[in-house]
Amino acid sequence: MEIIIPSLSSINEAAQQFLAQMGDHKVIAFYGKMGAGKTTFIKALCQTLGVEDVITSPTFSLVNEYTNREGNSIFHFDFYRIKKLDEVYDMGYEDYFYGGSLCLLEWPELIEDILPEEALKVTITEEIDGSRKLKW
């Protein structure tokens, strides 16, 4: 599947479209270069799901927890700064990935060996015209 985001002004529509098409996946791994828009898209997803908290990338804490309008937890991970998988083991990743809550992952290529098989792998690329393409 594929979604084109022509500009930042249409990102919330793209988030709604993505949520309608993602199925029942609970672990969603976002791949893309630095600046591709992973954090921005995750922020739009969370807002669309009714998160009212300030949504930021958990670059230093590894994970942020948000609550949606139904009171369900959403976990936002950023693995950019991990040095070795032991850091992820120590944080108890299995409780998150297999706990039934929505998990949104940035830089999943750094933990590829422990990603659940059923994780939805989404690639975000910046196109020549500045638009973004989501593909899964």
Image (tube, grey):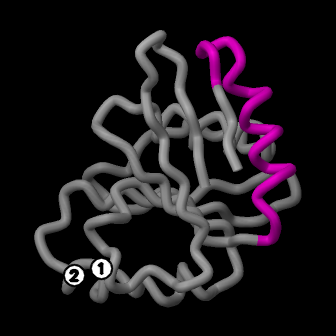
The picture quadrant where one finds residue 47 is top right
Tell me the quadrant of the picture where the C terminus can be found: bottom right
What amino acid type should be assigned to the residue bearing mark 1?
Val
Image coordinates for residue 80, horizontal then vertical, percent: 25, 55
- State whether residue 30 is above or below residue 23: above
Instruction: Kindly report the distance in space between the C-alpha atoms of the residues bearing marks 1 and 2.
Output: 5 Å
Image coordinates for residue 31, horizontal then vertical, percent: 41, 52
Residue under label 1: 88
Side of 104 where 80 appears, left or right: left
The picture quadrant where one finds residue 81 is bottom left
Q: Residue at 31% x, 58% y: name it.
A: 61
- Total labels: the figure holds 2
Residue 18 lies in magenta, yes or no? yes
Q: Are marks 1 and 2 in contact (CB under 8 Å)?
A: yes
- State whether residue 126 is above or below residue 3: above
What amino acid type should be assigned to the residue bearing mark 2?
Leu
Residue 85 tag number: 2
Image coordinates for residue 126, horizontal then vertical, percent: 43, 26
The picture quadrant where one finds residue 27 is bottom right
Q: Residue at 70% x, 56% y: name it.
A: 67
Q: Residues within 10 Å of mark 1 (few under 14, many from 20)?
A: some
In the image, the segment drawn in magenta is 5-24
Q: Secondary structure at mark 1?
A: helix
Side of 37 where 62 appears, left or right: left
Q: Residue at 60% x, 67% y: name it.
A: 120
Side of 131 where 115 appears, left or right: left
- State whether residue 34 is above or below residue 12: below
